[in-house]
Image: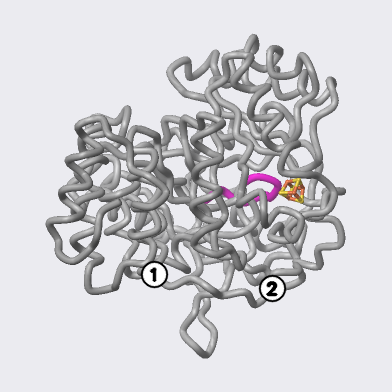
Amino acid sequence: MFNNDNMDSYQTLAERVLAGDPATASDARTILSSSDEDLLDLVAAASRLRREHFGNRVKVNYLVNLKSGLCPEDCGYCSQRLGSEADILKYSWLPKDEAKRQAEFGLAGGASRVCLVASGRGPSNRDVERVSGMVEEIKTSSPDVEVCACLGFLKDGQAQRLKDAGVDAYNHNLNTAESLYPDICTTHTFADRVDTVDKARGAGLSPCSGLIVGMGETDEQIIEAIESLKAVDSDSIPVNFLIPFDGTPLEGTWTLTPQHCLRILCAVRFLCPDRELRIAGGREMHLRTLQPLSLHVANSLFLGDYLTSEGQAAEEDLDMIVDGGFEIVGAESAERLRDELKAHRAAHQAAFAEVAPGDMKSDGTSAEAAKTASTLPCGKPLPTADQEADDSGVMIPTIRRRGAGTELTPNV
Ligand code: SF4
């Protein structure tokens, strides 16, 4: 254990980890309880580990929600859960062509990994065949893309089928500490989640498993969850910050500060120095103006929108990457990519009237929107609406009304 009396101690810890002596739960405890005053020193030390393993590169990932809502599970954080009253888009499986089209939007925006996600407890064998067909189609036209599937609990043989179809990774988040799990979900257990990550890894899929923080967990439980992610050997660790949707049990739950979000990312980086660490859902509303700093600790993000809520405009994601002096994995120039995206956006804004997401019905359609969307010349995005803010200045989620499952082009 180190003490945090001065900035040298974080640097000393980084040097220790770089020399191959892993950080401990006790180190993570010190990190999570450190003061705001120490934050920049902590981030500077964590950034040494990030740069050692990932240089100045940011991996861009893109979510395609293949099937949205109507899930029989009761995960308390999820807008798609059983009994959720959140007014999200609800739709069944996207057709194969549409899944490919949506994936290509992400690739055009700089993504090197596409994450194909479906709500539900787990796929039937028929669903696995369906997704396998989509993956084969995507890989045929974009052979370099990494595909991650996220379909819920896997039954025997399903991971192998996905692997055979060309799937590279499987996402199944452990989400939180085992000790908190019964408070978060009653329809499955933490052990069920571990089992699916094990199945994915066993079939040769790269395990992607991460966290949702801000659900009332203690710092000890954050450490417990990170230790579990180490135990399942997660290759990539998305850290989600709770989006407390209205109409879910965690509605109104705001426990995080931007500073503590950074400390959590630093704790993950120190405990898992060589793993892809991704800033995921809720980063905008919880990290807020500290988001750009987080990229000095994390090395990966989701571009654009999330499964059921909207993220900041894709060009703001790219601005954050460029302004931080980072490059994008698989792209020749992050700056050129960003400038091209902005040029497309500007052209569209000049050419077409803005369609506010608030005008959309919950199935993502409106006569006027469909008319406008159908006239877009190159499939690039419509202007985005600004995120709303409540009276306390805390951002509230904007339900996704564009991209997959709608007639509108996505935020990329
Ligand atoms: S997290 Fe997945 S399994 Fe849980 S309710 Fe949401 S869609 Fe269903």
- Per the image, label 1 sits on a secondary structure element best described as helix
Q: Residues within 10 Å of mark 2 (few under 14, many from 20)?
A: some
* Disc 2/disc 1 C-alpha distance (Å): 19 Å
Q: Nearer the viewer, residue 136 or 326?
A: 326
Residue 301: x percent and y percent?
Answer: 42, 46
Q: In the picture, residue 9 is in which quadrant?
A: bottom left
Q: Are marks 2 and 1 in contact (CB under 8 Å)?
A: no
Question: Which SS class for mark 2?
Answer: loop
State yes or no: Cβ of the residue under disc 1 lies below 8 Å from any atom of ligand 1.
no
Q: Residue furthest top?
A: 164
Extent of the magenta region: 404-411
Task: Give whichever of 244, 356 is nearer the camera.
Answer: 244
The x and y percentages for residue 87 are 75, 66
Is 91 covered by the magenta stretch?
A: no
Q: Which residue is mark 2?
A: 251
Whether residue 406 is in magenta: the answer is yes
Q: Amino acid at mark 1?
A: Pro
In the picture, residue 88 is in which quadrant? bottom right
Q: Considering only vertical position in the picture, is 250 above or below 122?
A: below
Name which residue lies at 37% across and 48% down.
Answer: 344
Residue 376, percent from left and from top: 52, 48
Q: Amino acid at mark 2?
A: Glu
As drawn, the label of residue 258 is 1
Q: Nearer the viewer, residue 245 or 209?
A: 209
Q: What residue is rendered at 66% in x and 42% in y?
A: 65
Residue 16: x %, y % from top left: 21, 39
Q: What is the residue that sits farthest to the bottom in this orientation?
A: 391
Of the image marks 2 and 1, the number of the one nearer the N terminus: 2
Along the line of sight, the residue nearer the viewer: 385 or 10? 10
Residue 243 seen in this snapshot: no
Going by the image, does 217 lie left or right of 368? left
Snapshot quadrant of residue 190: top right
